[in-house]
Image: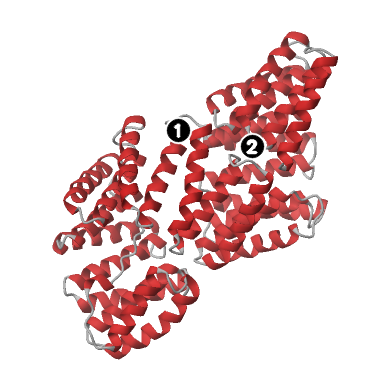
Amino acid sequence: MSTSKSIIALHQRALAEHERTLGPDHPSTLAARHNLALAHLQAGQPGQAIPLLERAVADCERVLGADHPDTLSSRYNLAGAYAAAQQLDKAIPLFERVVADGKRVLGADHTVVLNSQNNLASAYEEAGQIEQAISLFKRVVTDSKRALGADHPDTLVRRNNLANAYISAKRTKRAIPLLEQVVTDSERVKGARHPDTLGGRSNLASAYEEAGQMEQAISLFERVVADCKRALGVTPLFTAANRHSLAKAYQATGQTDKAIPLLEQSMAFLRREFDADHPTALDACRSLADAYRATGRARQAIPFIEQVLASQQRTLDADHPDILAARNRLAITYQEAGQRAQAIPLFEQSVADCERVKGADHPDTLVIRGNLADAYQVIGQTDKAIPLLERTMADCERTLGADHPDTLGSRHDLAFAYRTAGRVEQALPLFEQVLAGRQRMLGTDHPDTLIGRNNLALAYQATGQTDKAISLFEKTTADCERVQGADHPDTLVTRNNLALAYWAAGREEEAITLYERILPDVRRVLGSTHPTTRMVRENLRLARATGRPRSSWWRHLIGR
């Protein structure tokens, strides 16, 4: 039995004993019911906690009175359970009531009031009301400094939360100095390996990652994971979470070979300690599945994504957005694994559900419709794919604007479909528009911009503009190596395409030399059976045999 299950069973026995010996309304029984609910919350089971807390609130109001401190605490925890279950429409007004009642009964500087304001701000943030969240976090930090002092543990936590709200608002330049100061203060007050210090350092690493400072992020995550092994009072869940964060940072920089063992360790721990429906376990499932997919192991990814979907179908409403997203992800993975008979019906169901639940013009609907069109392309049904993509691009332009990332993505997909159907003259201007838009909106070094540049070079090659293609491939390869690293999967694909362009231009020796450098790298990074490795190996064999390249030996980067 997992630790969380054992704790819950212990509280269940205690509640039953109190009800039998003391009666349902005794204060000790009320406390035991409350503690059982908190055990369910700690185990990631807000659905089981909510009815217990709803009863606890009703019983406390009836037995102790609406303003009794235990009643306020129960109401506070019920609001937290609603927030954990994503029932923000219930959580926010209840937190607001707890804050108002707490100020009236306990005073503005009471711990319950400060905690309630902090959690109300977090609920605002979760609900997308980011400016309200930031404003309230600022007030809570000010009140905490006045009531408790700048170095009090609760004040440090609230300063950290304010910084995280700035990250949510995409204001990382404001967040990073705040987090750096929190970490410095926590190291001075509590010590370098105190759990709160490690938590602050972990959040700072996440901020660096959000700001694209990946080298600093990875270094800090590595330090946190190493310190977790030596620190006292650090929970195994915190260690697993940071191992997971480090793995995701490795993935973002193309170091999937380092990420997968960490994710597998986290997954093994979470399966031992928590139920399959625990949110952290589900997040680990998604990340491990993504890592397997990134290394061409889609079949290994499928059981994890199926587990996520099954869990969400058990615990969420049938039309919950997370279920729609998981179904779409599973369909994509079926397609990557070659299980097209399973992929296309799932895509079609996802499109129908999104149109019904969110509307035909919702951004998620547009993205999933594009995924269905891509699936049609893979099985050669371009007659179905192209009209769907044309409709999606028009809808994106109308509802989101010409330069929205999803509009640029839909334009890219339509360009790719035109090229696949041999309509390269229609594809070329779309690829040019995509690249121009990404450079304007995202900058020249953004990964999506680099993908757009690679695919435009392929379009130049397809229309016989070999000199343009080679020049663009050379620049893209250099930029990919500088920005993403020589071993990033996108860099490896772009180097393959540059070698093919040399080959197509009659520069066989340059092509062969480049292939001979690429092949050991793709074997080391992706493995000998990965599709990119097989493609590079075959291209090198044919180049040595003085064959001519075919269109199927080129590789588009499929980011949108």
| Rendered image coloring scheme | secondary structure
Q: Image quarter for residue 554?
A: bottom left
In the image, farthest residue toward the bottom: 509
x, y percent for residue 39: 72, 33
Q: Is residue 314 above or below residue 437?
A: above
- Confirm or deny contact between disc 2 and disc 1 (CB under 8 A): no
Q: Residue at x 16, y 70 (%)?
A: 463
Q: Is residue 486 above or below residue 135?
A: below
Q: Residue at x 65, y 19 (%)?
A: 54
Local packing at callout 2 (Cα closer than 10 Å; few below 14, some 14-19, many 20+) is many
Numbered badge on residue 7:
none
In the image, farthest residue toward the top: 62
Q: Which residue is mark 1?
A: 320
Amino acid type, label 1: His
Assign a secondary structure to mark 1: loop
Q: Residue at x 56, y 62 (%)?
A: 260
Quadrant into which the C terminus falls: bottom left
Task: Residue 377: tell me if it is visible.
Answer: yes
Amino acid type, label 2: Gly
Quadrant into which the N terminus falls: top right
Q: CA distance from mark 2 to mark 1?
A: 18 Å
Total marks placed? 2
x, y percent for residue 233: 80, 49
Q: Image quarter for residue 506?
A: bottom left
x, y percent for residue 67: 74, 14
The one of 474 and 315 positioned closer to us in this rendering = 315
Q: Which residue is mark 2?
A: 44
Assign a secondary structure to mark 2: loop
